[in-house]
């Protein structure tokens, strides 16, 4: 979505210097798990189990995602130097499914796309300016001009069809939440990252040119 903020006061060069690369984010999660922790302040066994599951999800997605020729071409055609700033948390299933695809897309044009990852709960001032229907939903990808840090727009927390599934469930929860999550994860598995690729490819056409 297009965003009305030109330059966000909390998105600074200093923030980007301390942000995680994709590999740095993976290393952070593994280190925290070794300490019996996850990201955020809730280190309950349930949250740790979500995080362990997400580590496996990220590995599986990274190994199986196939970028389409159209996606690769669109990423390689980006001429504006941009920052992709992603708000994430280790326990979030949507982050685990979408972030590896985002990282793979960014890697198609490292000269133009800088991928930086920060934790949602450590950056509430940023998160609260990029809410989804009033909620702090993640992942949230903020697209910035690398030179000026002007906000060009944002994407997230999930592809359109998946987001509609979530909204429909919230409005009319016809099944237990656990069963709905299984249905959502099945959709992700069948989609194979194609919806995310298509949506970011369209944004690249709009925001990736000088």
Image (cartoon, helix red, strand yellow):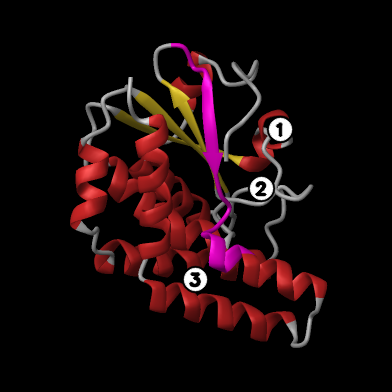
Q: Nearer the viewer, mark 1 or mark 2?
A: 1
Name the image quarter holding the N terminus: top right
Q: Quadrant of residue 128?
A: top right
Q: Few, some or many C-alpha atoms within 10 Å of disc 1 (few <14, some 14-19, many ≥20)? A: some
Q: Is the residue under label 1 in contact with that under label 3 (CB below 8 Å)?
A: no
Q: Name the residue under label 3.
A: 53
Q: Residue at 55% of width from left, 67% of height from top?
A: 161
Q: Few, some or many C-alpha atoms within 10 Å of disc 2 (few <14, some 14-19, many ≥20)? A: some
Q: In this view, does 21 lie above or below 4?
A: below
Estimate the x, y position of residue 82 in percent, counting from the top left: 37, 26
Q: Residue 129 carries which label?
A: 1
Q: Left or right of 55: which side holds 5? A: right
Q: What is the distance, in whole Å, between disc 1 and disc 2 at their CAs?
A: 19 Å
Which is more N-terminal, label 2 or label 1? 2
Which is more N-terminal, label 3 or label 2? 2
Estimate the x, y position of residue 75 in percent, counting from the top left: 26, 40
């Amino acid at each position: 979505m297009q965003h009305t903020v030109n330059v966000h006061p909390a998105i600074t060069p200093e923030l980007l210097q301390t942000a995680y690369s994709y590999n740095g984010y993976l290393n952070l999660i593994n280190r925290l798990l070794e300490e019996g922790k996850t990201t955020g302040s809730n280190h309950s066994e349930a949250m740790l189990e979500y995080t362990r599951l997400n580590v496996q999800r990220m590995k599986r997605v990274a190994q199986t995602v196939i970028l389409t020729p159209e996606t690769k071409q669109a990423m390689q055609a980006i001429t504006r130097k941009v920052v992709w700033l992603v708000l994430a948390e280790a326990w979030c299933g949507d982050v685990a499914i979408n972030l590896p695809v985002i990282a793979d897309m960014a890697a198609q044009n490292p000269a133009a796309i800088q991928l930086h990852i920060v934790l949602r709960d450590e950056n509430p001032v940023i998160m609260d300016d990029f809410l989804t229907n009033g909620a702090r939903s993640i992942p949230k990808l903020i697209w910035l001009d690398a030179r000026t840090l002007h906000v060009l727009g944002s994407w997230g927390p999930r592809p359109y069809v998946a987001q509609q599934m979530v909204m429909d469930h919230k409005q009319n929860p016809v099944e237990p939440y656990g069963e709905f999550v299984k249905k959502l994860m099945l959709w992700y598995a069948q989609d194979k990252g194609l919806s995310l690729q298509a949506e970011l490819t369209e944004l690249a056409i709009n925001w990736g040119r000088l």
